[in-house]
Amino acid sequence: MTPFSAWEDVSANSPCGKLSAELGFDVIHEDLDFFAHDLGECVVTNPPFSELPRVLARLRELGKIVVITPRSTLTTRSRTSRSL
């Protein structure tokens, strides 16, 4: 769980869901298929590591790619990261 104070720190660059709405951002937070829709100016997500290659490919396709993740997630070769 990310504390509210952490979202406040990054809110100018990556608003997210209900917390960002409380901070005054316009938020699209709907139960839609991420891979079938392109809504909003940015995407903020915390995908399961098993879906990371697919999510990164979709973000690249949409031209919306800024990822905040542990460096080890991107630099460790694993079954899922090889397809990045």
Image (tube, rainbow, N blue to C red):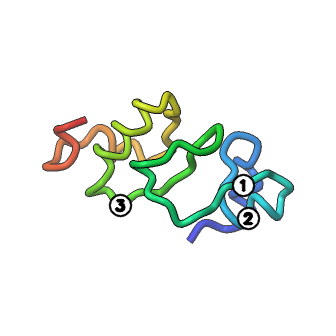
Q: Position of residue 53 (x, y in %)?
A: 28, 43
Q: Which residue is mark 2?
A: 19
Three-letter residue code for mark 3: Pro
24 w.r.t. 57: above or below? below
- The label on residue 48 is 3
Residue 41 circle label: none
In front of the other: 15 or 36? 36
Which label's residue is closer to the chain start, 3 or 2?
2
Q: Position of residue 33 (x, y in %)?
A: 44, 57
Residue 54 falls left or right of residue 19: left
Question: Which residue sits furthest left?
Answer: 79
Q: Position of residue 62 (x, y in %)?
A: 47, 32
Residue at the spot 80% in from the left edge and 52% down from the top edge? 25
Element type at marker 3?
loop
User: What residue appears at the point 67 percent right and 55 percent down from the top-left corner?
Assistant: 28
What's the residue type where badge 2 is placed? Leu
Which residue, given by chain and number where applicable, does mark 1 sit on? 27
- CA distance for labels 3 and 2: 21 Å
Left or right: residue 70 versus residue 72 is: right
CA separation in Å, label 1 and label 2: 10 Å
- Residue 61, position as x, y percentages in the image: 40, 30
> Looking at the image, which residue is at 59% across and 45% down?
39
The residue carrying pointer 2 sits among few (fewer than 14), some (14 to 19) or many (20 or more) residues within 10 Å by Cα, namely some
Q: CA distance from mark 1 to mark 3?
A: 22 Å
- Pick the quarter of the image with the N terminus: bottom right
Q: Nearer the viewer, residue 68 or 71?
A: 68
